[in-house]
Amino acid sequence: MDNPHKTALVVGAKGVIGGNLARHLETLEDWSIIGLSRRGGRSTDRIRHISVDLLDPTDCANKLADLSGVTHIFYAAYQDRPTWAQLVEPNLAMLVNVVTAVERVAPNLAHVSLMQGYKVYGAHLGPFKTPAREDEDNHMPPEFNMDQQAFLQRQQRGKSWTWSALRPSVVIGVATGNPMNLAMVVGLYASMSKELGLPLRFPGKPGAYDTLLEMTDAGLLARATVWAATTPQCANQAFNITNGDLFRWNEMWPKIARFFAMETAAPLPMSLNVVMADKAALWREMKEKYALADHPYEAVSSWGFGDAVLSWNYDFFADGSKARRLGFHDYVQTDEMFLSAFREMREQRIIP
């Protein structure tokens, strides 16, 4: 951390979290940036993209062999699987492969930043203790976030580098091809509902419309991630990172409807994964009618993730005061965050 110029390795650079982190790092003059992803990307004078199969230790070792200058690993990769148990092996393996490969060649590695979430508190299983705090006891596995942190703790012993674990709520930002993107879910659902002449109905489970929850802006998370990775008193700790406010869908949903110039109607529980499965043809018609960007339907829809988030009929929030006590004071107004994401989606011609 004493090195004035730092080199970031952003793992998962094409996702909502990694992409926004890379864009934030591009604004900081004292950073060089390398992005890892399966798809790769077009390198610029600010970021070098590398296409790599993170599940293949040999490919990792070969593709990362020349990254001797890396000082900070920002790990935000994720691979989806059908069950909680099946998530563990691939998501742990990717982290192990990256850290092992970089440690081997980067003598000045200073920090490894791990992106987690409220699954460490059991939020995905049902009602959990709120506000959740970073020192909560672990719950019954399987849970890959816990396995990843345990690996870092073991791997770091006796080493000069440190780690941090960031725990955001649902992260809101704009990116295509991501399986966990609520902004895309709501933006597309609203746009298609409007195209069909329908009001905007909340589709979540009974009770979810009225529960208390919070979210995390992707830009705020990027700033917090760099802060934790470069602040010595944050070493080897976890931090909840949230916007700083709470909301209920029964207040947020009408604001979203007004943005799209739509009326609301009574909530109607339905699985988006089911009711939106036949909408690819409608999407093609909308792309042609409104001259939208040519993204395939699968790249812009995350209906299963939307079903999960909109089904939380229990309070969903954590205590973010630990980060504030150590010096991170940024906040974002959540209703404006949603509207800003929808405006960006329009600018990128993702929605009309």
Image: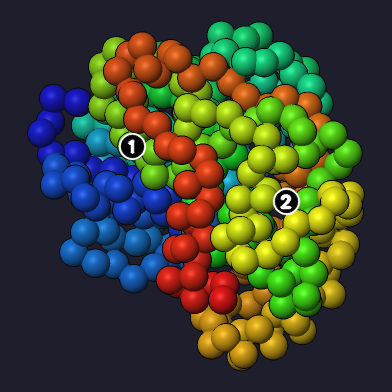
Left or right: where 320 falls relative to 203: left
Residue sitting at the far left? 4
Q: Nearer the viewer, residue 131 or 227?
A: 131
Tell me the residue that label 1 is attached to. 223
Image coords of residue 279 (percent x, y) = 79, 75
Residue under the image location 77 percent in, 84 percent down: 281
Mark 2 Cα within 10 Å, few/some/many (few <14, many 20+)?
Answer: many
Image coords of residue 300 (percent x, y) = 62, 67
Quadrant of the snapshot with the C terminus: bottom right
Image height of 348 relative to 272, above or below: below
Figure quadrant of residue 177: bottom right
Label 1's element?
A: helix
Residue type, label 1: Arg
Tell me the residue that label 2 is attached to. 306
Label 2's element?
A: helix
Residue under the image location 72 percent in, 77 percent down: 195
Residue under the image location 18 percent in, 64 percent down: 45
Quadrant of the snapshot with the N terminus: top left
What's the image's color scheme? Answer: rainbow
Left or right: where 193 falls relative to 157: right
Q: Is residue 313 visible?
A: yes
Image coords of residue 251 (percent x, y) = 66, 40
Image coords of residue 20 (percent x, y) = 40, 51
Mark 1 Cα within 10 Å, few/some/many (few <14, many 20+)?
Answer: some
